[in-house]
Image: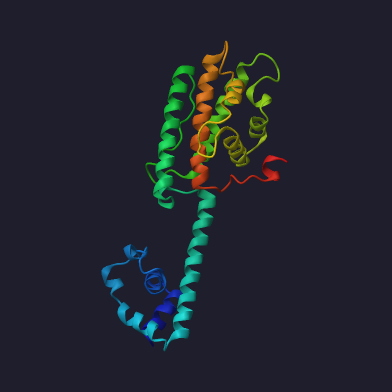
Amino acid sequence: MEDFEVIRNWMESGTAEQSMYGLYVGHELFADPYESNPYAGQLSKEDIERFNLDELRAKKTSGIYAKQFEAMQTDFINMQKTIQAAKDARQQLQGKTIDDLDDVSSENIRQFSDNLNKEINRYNERSKSDVLTVPDFTTNMSSTRGAKSLHVDVLQSIIDADHSEEWLPGTSAWQEEPDLKKFQDAAGTAKWVAMRKLVETYLDEEGEPFNEALAREVWDAEGLRSGEGKERYDLFYATLRSFRELMLADPYGTIITPQTVGD
């Protein structure tokens, strides 16, 4: 049996180790030659040298075994699709971790989550509150799914605090601002979608604060109660800016639909 036939058999029904070798060889033969092989680090030197890659490349180039190598390429592509589907399913269930994020996204999330946590700590100290901080993504224990939910908790905390201090019925932030009301009325991950709408309303395309006059009015950040209101205003914007980075890195759960937010 030819070496490429052995490898193809491993691709289709081999052990975990054999399948990994099949992915390694498939990448060497069919992927961009300038792209580093992502499977090399998961194999020993002995495994990698099990077959002569130069001979395999020569057989592929010769055209004599064109159909066999075409079938091997199809197997390689199908293996990659299966791996990606499993990865997508895991990310939908658990969110993305540092390992799943590119360097730019990771750095942005760390920067804005750190800024948010500083704002949370200031808010807690000044208002004698106990709002929980959000994941800082410095370890692989953090996930975008968990982080989104904690951002929801932060926003809900200041909405509840504002509501508890209003004297007149119907004058709290969520009762006066339609997008905040949608957030208040939403449940579960539908709150993520409602937060996306708030991001679009209160941040511009670059992620900078927008509609600040409206936000100051919503949170009573001016006038007699400007102290507490300004603290919530600052935390509101810090929360949205941090959530925006999560949303850009992992859009799952933040797609706006009539079913999740309303017409």
Q: Is residue 16 above or below residue 205?
A: below
Q: How many marks?
A: 0
Q: Quadrant of the N terminus?
A: bottom left
Residue pictured at 50% horizontal, 25% vertical: 234
Q: Residue at x 64, y 30 (%)?
A: 180
Query: In the image, residue 63 lies at what x, y percent?
Result: 42, 86
Is any atom of residue 51 visible in this view?
no
Q: Residue at x 52, y 61 (%)?
A: 85
**Image coords of residue 169 (percent x, y):** 70, 17
**Type of colouring:** rainbow
Furthest residue to the top?
224
Q: Quadrant of residue 37?
A: bottom left
Q: Residue furthest right?
A: 263
Rendered-image quadrant of the C terminus: top right
Q: Is residue 145 above or below residue 167?
A: below
Residue 128 at x, y = what percent?
A: 48, 18
Question: Going 50% across and 70% down the picture, which residue do you hit?
Answer: 78
In the image, 187 versus 202, the foreground residue is 202
Q: Is residue 253 in view from this perspective?
A: yes
Q: Considering depth in this image, is 206 or 158 the residue closer to the camera?
A: 206
Q: Position of residue 81 (x, y in %)?
A: 51, 66
Q: Is residue 78 above or below residue 227?
A: below
